[in-house]
Amino acid sequence: MDSDDLKILKAAPLFEALDQNVIVSILGEIRPRQYDRHQILFEQGAVAEFFCLILEGWVRVFRTTSEGRETTLAVYSKGSSFAEAALFMKRNYPASAETLAPSRIVKIDGKRLRAAIRADPDIAFAMLASTSHHLKIMVEQVEQMKSLSAPQRLAAFFLKLCPNYRQTVTVKLPFEKALIAHHLGMKPASLSRAIVALQERGVHVDRDEVAIENVFALEQFIRLERRG
Amino acid sequence: MDSDDLKILKAAPLFEALDQNVIVSILGEIRPRQYDRHQILFEQGAVAEFFCLILEGWVRVFRTTSEGRETTLAVYSKGSSFAEAALFMKRNYPASAETLAPSRIVKIDGKRLRAAIRADPDIAFAMLASTSHHLKIMVEQVEQMKSLSAPQRLAAFFLKLCPNYRQTVTVKLPFEKALIAHHLGMKPASLSRAIVALQERGVHVDRDEVAIENVFALEQFIRLERRG
DNA sequence: CGCGGCGTTGATCTCTGTCAATACTTGTGG
DNA sequence: CCACAAGTATTGACAGAGATCAACGCCGCG
């Protein structure tokens, strides 16, 4: 296992409280694998045998209804884990997952994990913290959906992409705009209009390049003008 | 501890896999308490010392933004536990909770729980399953908010109230309409209109009585006419 | 060059929030 | 038993955000 990979693993909420050798023991002989774009990691309904941790790249978790319509539930990137939940519930995946970009991902085996928890209950606490963390993210998303306009949600999305806190930054959009729109609960057409709306607030989008003149002003924009 | 209460506890999703004496050991000397309507169980930001399990009644979990705006995140009833997640995160509650009706609730001590998990790691699986379940609920809510209209969300809410799967049912609304509206991410005025809209789909609401002519047709209504 | 996938733009429409007026319900006190 | 007040629900008029539908532009690719 690459030491950079291990560093990412240890930075993940799921493993941050764990000792390095514990992580290694949970992984067992399993190694990260490289995936192309649009590769399926697991399918809705399948028995949950592992959960995933992203070392590099982007993954979309989505549900397919009986009529074949797809809904994106979440999009994860570097350092995020997902599908742990399924391991402890009905034990089959309630959704499918696919890569959105070339990605490096570890699949962590459920059986090994259970054995490890039995051996060392502290692992359980770390996992509980992780699912709790995800829960909080969803809670925030619900709150955001209810209280922010489309341009505000887009601004929030941009800000989450910013790696550091300089005033002026440029970031790259991680995936297609149609998907970003869906992720933010709006239509592609509305996303385009939200982009236009953000122009007069010093945000300029060209292709997948986003230039933000003033990060702090953008934060203001989200906080200041809530719809009541 | 009342034997009826113990029966409810043992039937709760959180404890169903656990042995009765394990439950008793987690509870310790703590007994259920009776709460009036609109009593605060814990407040957002407070140090998380316990989680709750409802023996009887209704509870709402909500978040208050810095500007004082409230968002209802979830509503729970008999048998449900909530706020377990807070015990394993940053250790303070990310939201507040209040009773919506006179309720009997056990507050389960975090320290004791942690000790119990250390003693018996299987309890951790129960907790993981439970927090995962909450996560799934939130995920569903996000999906619903994104893809369903107000009447559809109301229909989904009614269907969740139905205890069984007969074609025709009448259910009672568990709490005030203003709150249902808030729970579903709409305004009371919009709820009234959603009710009117559902009339022509065979749903008739009088006071807190809801009569559904055809449960299956209502399910169709949610699935068939997705917007997107 | 033409084709197909995205993305943008414009015109229009629908839904839901807003605000306000009006019931209906419940509880209280005379 | 009635009068009144407070809380709760419905209804109407209106405005704005975002959806919808369709046309068009842009770009990569065979």
Image (cartoon, coloured by chain):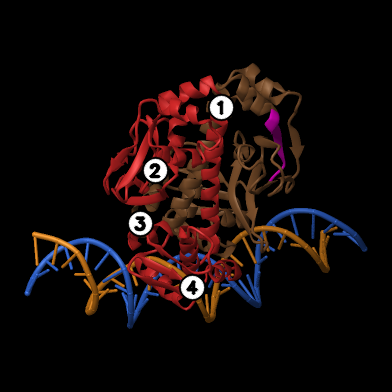
Chain colours: A red, B brown, C blue, D orange
Residue B148 visible in the snapshot: no
Task: Say which residue appears at 48% left-offset and 27% top-offset.
Answer: A21
Q: Which mark is drawn over residue B225?
A: 3
Q: Which element is circle 3 on?
A: loop
Quadrant of the image occupied by residue C12: bottom left
Residue C11 falls left or right of residue B215 = left
Q: Disc 1 designates what residue?
A: B124
> Which of the two discs, 4 and 3, sits closer to the camera?
4
Q: Chain of mark 1?
A: B
Q: Circle 2 is placed at which residue position?
A: A55
Residue B119 location, x and y as percent? 62, 19
- Image height check: is B103 above or below B23? below
Residue at image x 56%, y 66%?
A219
Q: Name the kind of residue labelled 1 in the image.
A: Ala
Q: CA distance from mark 4 to mark 2?
A: 30 Å
Instruction: Determine the CA span between mark 1 and mark 3.
Output: 41 Å
Name the residue beneath numbered marker 4: A213
| B16 to B222, vertically: above or below | above
Mark 3 Cα-neighbour bin, 10 Å: few <14, some 14–19, many ≥20: few
Q: Nearer the viewer, residue B97 or B173?
A: B97
User: What number is the disc on residue A148?
Assistant: none
Magenta span contains residue B110: yes
- Residue type of the residue flagged with mark 3: Glu
